[in-house]
Image (cartoon, grey):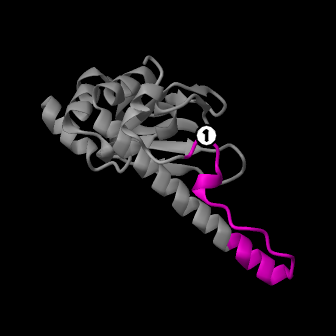
Amino acid sequence: MSIQADARQFTQIPFLANLEPRALELIAFSGETRIMRRGEILFHRGDQADAGYVVLSGRLTLDPGDGREPVSVLPGALVGEMALVVATERKATATVAEPSGILRIPRPLFHRALRENPASAIRLRAFCAKRLTDFAGELNAIRRKMEADSKVDPAPDVSAEDLPGSHPARSDDVSELPGN
């Protein structure tokens, strides 16, 4: 497959669909493709996360290790998207369930793609802000239902703007990325 064809496949992944074609091509060209065998561990719960992974073929299993059922991850999925943006910890162990092709996207590569394509950074920030706003709305709805069910005094709603680091996207926000 060509770099352009690989990049076009990434547009089917909501998080990556916010990036311009040039940014996706850089990721497709510079990402690290690995062929993994059944039973191999991609990462462990608690590991420091320094990359995201696109499942190109095969299947992974994510086990949170807390008694909840493991989740299957199929081709076309991005695992560890927040690790592309910030340092974080793995919340599950990823095991290869069948022979798989995996594209590793190191955080520095992703940051480079955003620095070199500022419109991508702005669109991705807006995407994350909307997702955070939607999540805050869902939490508020759950809280209101719990308050109604238990007859407790209502608390004020929380919005994404109340959270640290949330402000409207600006064209100079790309300067906040590490390496700038």
Query: Vertically, is 111 above or below 147?
Result: above
The number of discs equals: 1
Which quadrant is home to the C terminus? top left
The residue carrying mark 1 is: 92
Residue 73 in sight from this viewpoint: no
| x then y, percent, for residue 46 | 67, 31
Left/right placement of residue 163 relative to residue 31 reads: right
Q: Is residue 150 magenta?
A: yes
The part of the image, by quadrant, that contains residue 108 is top left
Q: Nearer the viewer, residue 125 or 41?
A: 125
Q: Residue at x 29, y 25 (%)?
A: 116
Query: Vertically, is 69 above or below 63?
Result: below
| x then y, percent, for residue 133 | 54, 59
**Mark 1: secondary structure:** loop
Span shown in magenta? 142-166
Q: Amino acid at mark 1?
A: Ala
The part of the image, by quadrant, that contains residue 53 is top left
Left/right placement of residue 95 relative to residue 46 reads: left
